Image (cartoon, grey):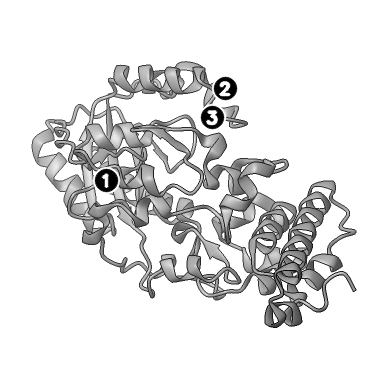
Amino acid sequence: MNIDYVALARQIKQWGKALGFQQVGITDIELSQADKYLRNWLNRGFHGEMAWMVKHGAKRTHPDRLISGVRRIISVRMDYLPEEPDPKALLKDPEQAFVSRYALGRDYHKVLRQRLQKLAERISEQVGTLNYRAFVDSAPVMEKALAEKAGLGWIGKHSNLINRNAGSWFFLGELYTDLPLPIDQPVQEHCGDCTACLDCCPTQAIVAPYQVDARRCISYLTIELKGAIPLELRPLIGNRIYGCDDCQQCCPWNRFATPTEITDFSPRHGLDQATLLKLFAWTETDFLRFTTGSAIRRIGHARWLRNIAVALGNAPVNARIYQALKQRADHPSDMVREHVHWAMQQQKQMKEQHTSSGNATECAEAIGICQ
């Protein structure tokens, strides 16, 4: 079969946009620069407990070792920013729960993978037999490095991909294929002298431009970390209970971001406006029910309670908060108990400080503590 691959590449981009991808790019499999960066990052231990970053060896930066015969990678972008009031307001209200914007709606893995599958089917109809694999934040894939090479944007100082017309509120997905398609060119980097993301990171996890120490990152601490959150970092987490968007919220390029039209990414179960106490009251049955089809489910109920306990410990002194913590003080999980007890102690200390300062109003509001 004689195939015009230049024309096919144009069609692939048109089909991709018809399927809801805002951008489609094509690149080769050469990732030597990304391999050098990854090795340095791993050698510095910045991956923390994410052993899977090491487990697959060279497959991550050598796509042909992951999928035999792969020649090109089709990289796609799908915007996810929900239509909502300014999320920064949530961070200013310590009794509200902050959930990273990407996790408010349906699990993005499923949404993108289904559409990538449909894109592969369209290509197969055109070329006949197609050897391919679709990936969405799964398997050892350097998705940001590939997207950068495919011209979807540049990797910013916070290590996220930035598009000058759309900011960084988007998901990435890939189709590995054996088709010899023409490749796209990378775009110019436009971070310049800006250090907004480094300056606004609550835990100073961005230790240098383009260098993120995951061990300090709130997203890592609340999602990837399976054990206890380090004591010195707990007060810095604030009311962030699943992920953190600060480096994106302060990025100047996100003034160009527009809300998504994909309803799957709209907030579910009021997670964009929920209080800490409401979410802390969820039983494990509630958690499983309300996180069905959500990326949040992967952390499990115990880590969910761990995260919220830390946020409650960071909230202003409040008898209702103390009593809610007290009800979880005998939780069967050692990890949950440890964080609950820490939060209770935080509330006690704040109450004592208010008492010693003679603030009668705040003392009255905290009257239930220690009783």
Snapshot quadrant of residue 37: top left
Residue topped by disc 2: 55
Q: Amino acid at mark 3?
A: His
In the image, residue 143 sits, relative to residue 347, either above or below, namely above
Residue in the picture at 15% in, 40% down: 9
Task: Give me the C-alpha separation between circle 3 and circle 1.
Answer: 22 Å
- Crowding around mark 2 (Cα neighbors within 10 Å: few <14, some 14 to 19, many 20+) is few
| Residue 338 to residue 210: above or below | below
The quadrant holding residue 108 is bottom left
| Foreground residue among 152 and 4 | 152
Q: Secondary structure at mark 1?
A: strand
Quadrant, the N terminus: top left
Q: Position of residue 163 (x, y in %)?
A: 22, 48
In this image, 59 relative to 259: left or right? right
- Relative image position of residue 255 (x, y in whole percent): 24, 60
Crowd rating for badge 3 (residues with CA inside 10 Å; few <14, some 14–19, many 20+): some
- In front of the other: 344 or 224: 344
What residue is pinned by disc 1? 162
Q: Earlier in the sequence, mark 3 or mark 2?
A: 3
The circle drawn on residue 47 is: 3
Ranked by sequence position, the earlier of labels 1 and 2 is: 2
Question: Looking at the picture, which amino acid does disc 2 mark?
Answer: Lys
Residue 244, numbered label:
none
| Secondary structure type for disc 3 | loop
